[in-house]
Amino acid sequence: MDERGSTLGQADVEAIVRAYLGRMARRYSPLLGALLVLILLATLIPSRSQPVNNAAGSQAAAAGSNEVPDGGTGVGGGTSGNVAASSSGAGTATGGAASTSAAITPPAAAGSRGGARSGVACAPGVRQVKWTVYAPLCVPRYTGNNGGTRYRGVTKDKIIAFYRRDRSAQDTAINAALGSANLDDNKYIADLQTYISFFNKQFELYGRRVELVVYDGQGDYLNEDQGLDQGQAQADAQHAVDINGFVDATFPLKGSYPFWQALADRKAITLGPTGFPQGWYQERSPFWYSSFPTGTGVASWLSMMVCRRMAHMKPSFAGDASFSLQNRVFGLVHPDNPEYKEISSFLLSQLAKCGVKLAANISYTFNVATMGNQSASVAAQLKGAMVSTALCYCDPVFPIFLANSADSQDYHPEWWMPGWGDAQAQNLPRDQWIHAVVIGGKYPAKKDDEAYKVFKLIKPNAEPTGPYYAVAYGIMLLLYDALQQAGPNLTPATFQNGWFGLGSISGPAGTLEWKPGHFSPIVSAPLAWWDPNATSNFNGSQGAYQPCERTKFFPFDFDRASEWGSGQLRCFGK
């Protein structure tokens, strides 16, 4: 039933889902706009895929076999010695090698005095640009020989980023439902180009500039994530190689596990994979990174929330008062694909350490056609196990069905799930979601949105072309950070050195950490509750997430568990 008491039929719910399949992209809030939705844990639709084995991962990690060897470490691991380059062409699937025999000119040390490309006067501790704290230490303007072609897609004057303009059979219905707010590749690419053009002038790329090459993909990204169109995903990844692509700039929701895996197999870098177990990034190193949290990070966060702030305590925000008569009883709901199964196993092992045993552990299959029946069964199992606190480690679509099924069965527990954003929560039944907390925060107003402020710095008299400009900003900022830190000898190996070498930076989005093993720099996240009476900064509609505990960021790292404090969660305006 909805908040007015009317029953939602299958067609009604499917209409909501069709609209949301486009609107889900809004979960990507600005990277630096208070870290609202940078605490996501999974791609839109769980992939129906199998993990690669360690042997395959090791083979993928051997990208350096055709790279120019390092001759010394400059800024962020870039070459600073006399590196003799081989001349073995630069367009092959193995990555290609350098085509010049001249020695690479080492860059000035980061933080040394001199003028930067951005106009900043470099000095110890000064960042490359003034408009964000999340930038590398300043590097004086580079002159000299950058070594020419260092890898496929890295020439004397260019770094080729590629964008797969994808499509799906469901796009027509999605776009019809969204109208002017639809996910339009062309609009997103226009905003991407705006940031790229600006960043090329601001960051030190050692004589190179990023050039975006857009191509039309053959695969259906939604089908790929459900185990279909695997051949098309491979063909699209091969096309990226054929155009000498170095790094993937595709909108993350238009990617898929098969596409990202195919890129790793072909030794191309991507920042798209989101929410996978830590080991999956390690197995595909140095090619996989994430602008958003890893699944392992979020599972660690959830386990500490349960163990330190919920376990062995009575439910404090359940919709059914009878639940408050005894300590919390936990149940877990998650998709049945391999990465979620691995993450759920990790979560269970952590919960066991604080004496929490799940009363229900239920998986479901991502198939919209069967979600009505599946959600009814899941709700019945949770209710039958007397679960007071349902942990829905779910994609953004299934909770729409599950919360309505819970309503129809008069089941009103406490809820937790990833913070899929205000737009998604506005589609959930009010009488259920007023009893929910999420990993997430409040959507920022434009005046506090760094992505918007930087866009206006570039184009004072214009507005972003599409609604997802903040995604472009956040991903490009991470990309350019690593490119600068990598130095002039740019290869996947030095890119990874650059990514891991940025260190810790604190700012409005909390502390981000680029350290060895951190394939995502997101290491903490806020907690939020659903206020149905608040006005959303995202779309101006009624209903918005509000911060718990004064926007405190809670860590993913178990070594910092004490920062979680103790006692009941303080949310719901308390």
Image: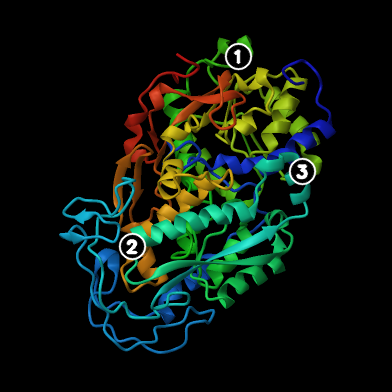
**Position of residue 281 measured from the top left corner of the image (x, y, whole percent):** 48, 58
Q: Mark 3: which secondary structure?
A: helix
Query: Would you place residue 371 above or below residue 95 in this image?
Result: above
Residue at image mark 2: 484
Tags 2 and 1 touching, CB below 8 Å: no
Q: Nearer the viewer, mark 1 or mark 3?
A: 3
N-term-proximal mark, 3 vs 2: 3
Indicate the quadrant containing the N terminus: top left, top right, bottom left or bottom right.
Answer: top right
Amino acid type, label 2: Gln
- Quarter-wise, where is residue 138 in the image? bottom left
Q: Label 2, label 1: how many angstroms apart (C-alpha)?
A: 54 Å
**Position of residue 548 measured from the top left corner of the image (x, y, whole percent):** 45, 23
Amino acid type, label 1: Phe
Indicate the quadrant containing the C terminus: top left, top right, bottom left or bottom right.
Answer: top left
N-term-proximal mark, 2 vs 1: 1
Q: Nearer the viewer, mark 3 or mark 2?
A: 3
Residue at image mark 3: 176
Q: Mark 2: which secondary structure?
A: helix
Query: Would you place residue 206 above or below residue 433 in this image?
Result: below
Residue at image mark 1: 323
**Position of residue 36 measured from the top left corner of the image (x, y, whole percent):** 48, 36
Density class for disc 1 (Cα within 10 Å; few <14, some 14-19, many ≥20) is many
Density class for disc 2 (Cα within 10 Å; few <14, some 14-19, many ≥20) is many
**Position of residue 331 measured from the top left corner of the image (x, y, whole percent):** 61, 30
Q: Label 1, label 3: how many angstroms apart (C-alpha)?
A: 43 Å
N-term-proximal mark, 1 vs 3: 3
Left or right, 537 with respect to 128, comes to right
> Residue at position x 24%, y 54% from top?
120
Name the residue nearer the viewer: 57 or 432: 432
Amino acid type, label 3: Ala
> Residue at position x 47%, y 74% from top?
153
